[in-house]
Amino acid sequence: MFERKIYNEILKWKREYAPKYALFLKGARRVGKTTLAEKLGREEYKSYILVRFDQTDESINRLFTDSLRDLDMLFNTLQFAYNTRLYQRESLIILDEIQLFPPARQALKTLLEDGRYDYIETGSLAGITKKSKNILIPSEEYPLDVLPMDYEEYLWANGNDMIIPTLKEHISSLKPMGSLHQHIMKSYREYMLVGGMPQAVTAFVESKDFENVDFAKEQIINLYKQDMNDQEEENPEYVTGFFDRIPSELSKHDKRYVLTHLDPNARIRDYKDPIKWLDEAMIINIANNVDDPSAALNLSIIDPSFKCYMMDTGLLITLAYKDRPYLENELYKAILLDKLQVNEGMLLENMVAQNLRANGRRAYYYKETSKDTKKTIMEIDFLIRDGSKLVPIEVKSGEKKSIKSLTAFKDKYGKKVGRGIVLHHGEIRVEENLLWLPYYMASVL
């Protein structure tokens, strides 16, 4: 059982919001939602019941639709079905993969009003909106996003609790990392390969064998693909086609997802709902383009211009080479030998997007084109906020050193913009009013 930061938020829910609100742990499959819920059940309650809607039969499902007027019967049946005694105000009921049976979500309003037990839902919002069009969604929910393990949690799993405090100290003082730089860069590359899915991290911690890690990630991707094919809300071919194309689109110069690369006749109206399904399944991490940067970035989003990252960079690497044997995975070899050239920007940008999301920041980018030539004249990889200031971030892979876009962005938006950040392979330094940081510093931005 790995230490997860979100567990403190779960404890806060139990202290301050249960039993009036059900906790909704949202996240992709295999990201650790059920493990966290069961940990709470074991450690903080006298007993708990796990109702898995990917395994329940019709008799259990009917309890949440037909027995709401006789809750005594509902709870007694659950106790016998799961051979677990429930204790008033001392037991937890976990409704796992709630998106597979939305009527149970509607039932929570009645169950919470009854007040005997606490409730956790786990799952995603993928497809649940269409499935729930004829039911009442309860307002008494406390939602938490469960993401892949971040860099610090990955380090904890590997017995290292010193790196992140060191990074925070150095980014505050702007003191170069010195002899620590290469050591931390190696660790960060390792995290890039493994990713933050608990199953993959477990494989690495137990074996230190990247082939075992890759196998674990393949199983997760296969599960996602099966879910895409099994869902009935969107066209499965559109969902899987869009998903499979992600590495190819990220490998292009501007990283922007262009639907016509997928199909010359593709239109955003056809793919809007399939993209939303993947986003709500928390498999992908969408970065929106903004045309008029301000402190409220979400108010100036351009639709349909977007970039599409994977929520987990480790899964992106496996997806990119899913049709090749492990030892022919060139990205593994290049990353391990620190010789990334081809597609380096794809992985590094995905890592930064993942780091920012883990720190509670949504991904935004800025692109300006000439009205006459339609060519790009300015592009910023990421935009974040620092108080009232916009912070532009450029990710420089390989030997690329140009900072023209950062300079032009500062000139155009002036006082709205704070010090720009360049993430690169080298050390900490301040140059031309820009802060140059090693890639791994994205984990503490």
Image: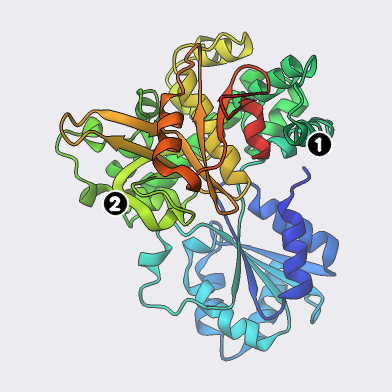
Q: Residue 258 carries which label?
A: none
Q: Look at the picture and state if 439 lies above or below 102.
A: above
Residue 329 visible in the snapshot: no
**Percent position (x, y) of residue 297?**
44, 53
Farthest residue, direction bottom: 69
- Categorize mark 2 by other alpha carbons within 10 Å: few (<14), some (14-19), many (20+): few
Front position in the image: 35 or 196: 196
Left or right for 381, reference 239? right
Per the image, label 2 sits on a secondary structure element best described as helix
- Categorize mark 1 by other alpha carbons within 10 Å: few (<14), some (14-19), many (20+): few
Instruction: State if disc 2 and disc 1 touch (CB < 8 Å).
Output: no
Left or right for 75, reference 424? right
Q: Residue at x 67, y 25 (%)?
A: 188
Front position in the image: 77 or 226: 226
**Percent position (x, y) of residue 388?**
56, 54
Looking at the rendered structure, the kind of residue marked 2 is: Lys
- Count of marks overlaid on the render: 2
Residue 87 visible in the snapshot: yes
Name the N-terminal-most of marks 1 and 2.
1
Q: Which residue is drawn at 63% across and 12% down?
A: 336
**Picture quadrant where residue 142 is located:** bottom right
Left or right for 17, reference 374? right
Between marks 1 and 2 in the image, the one whose residue lies nearer the viewer: 1
**Picture quadrant where residue 262 is located:** top left
Per the image, label 1 sits on a secondary structure element best described as helix
Q: Residue at x 53, y 56 (%)?
A: 54
Front position in the image: 55 or 222: 222
Identify the residue position indicated by label 1 in the image: 165
Identify the residue position indicated by label 2 in the image: 272
Q: Look at the picture and state if 147 lies above or below 329.
A: below
Left or right for 426, reference 225? right
